[in-house]
Image (tube, helix red, strand yellow):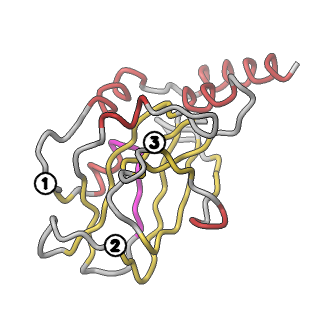
Amino acid sequence: MLRRFFDFCVAILKKIFRIKGEEMSERESRRSKDDGFHVVSDKELWKYGVKVIIEDDNIVPVEGPFPEEAMSAITEEYQPNRAIMNLAFATRKDPNELEKKLDPPIIVRFWYTEDDLAFACEKNKQISMAFWENEDKKWIKFTREKHNFCLVPEVNDDYIGYGEVKLSNWDDPGISVGK
């Protein structure tokens, strides 16, 4: 019964909103091949479905190479569906000078698609988002307790909602959406 309801909702959303699947796969496959970080604009962030709210004018969002091994790391706790990006924060003067302590905290919104939601619902799981822990080589889910994580349904041309986190400590992990 739940599955039929979900299929019905997906069918309605497909008719009302056209998700640009081909463009999404192009975004997913984009990877930085160099070892350095580069500053990303609001427009570039939106290509990944990311919105960043930074109060400190001296801090900028930067992107680094995505850890390729991360997408094949599947556990019972988390299975990635789609890589979002390797997001970090740096000083405006030097994009390779990463800021790990963020004061005031930074709010990041990661938008999810209809396909992301369908992927999670296949196993009757809630959609979740996680970051890659380089040292232990594993995904760590964002949580309400540690990251003030919440899901917000909000439909636009490309997405059907977002996960929001508030970060005060951050390294340079890759981020994905999954279940």
- Residue 148: quadrant of the picture: bottom right
Looking at this rendering, what residue extends furthest in the right direction?
Answer: 1
Give the mark, 2 or 3, whose residue is nearer the N terminus. 2
Give the mark, 2 or 1, whose residue is nearer the N terminus. 1
- Residue 164: quadrant of the picture: bottom right
Q: Amino acid at mark 2?
A: Lys
Q: Amino acid at mark 3?
A: Ser
Residue for badge 2: 100
Q: Is 92 on the left-hand or right-hand side of 117?
A: left
Q: Is 158 on the left-hand or right-hand side of 155?
A: left
The relative height of residue 13 versus residue 151 in the rendered view (above or below) is: above
The location of residue 149, given as percent across then percent down, is: 61, 59
* Residue occupying image coordinates x 12% and y 76%: 93
Look at the image and give the residue range highlighted in magenta.
Answer: 47-53
What label sits on residue 176 in the rendered view? Answer: 3
* Mark 2 vs mark 1, CA separation in Å: 16 Å
The relative height of residue 107 versus residue 122 in the rendered view (above or below) is: below
What label sits on residue 36 in the rendered view? Answer: 1
Q: Nearer the viewer, residue 26 or 173?
A: 173
Q: Amino acid at mark 1?
A: Gly
* Mark 1 vs mark 3, CA separation in Å: 20 Å
The location of residue 14, given as percent across then percent down, is: 59, 21
* Mark 2 vs mark 3, CA separation in Å: 20 Å
The location of residue 144, given as percent across then percent down, is: 66, 62
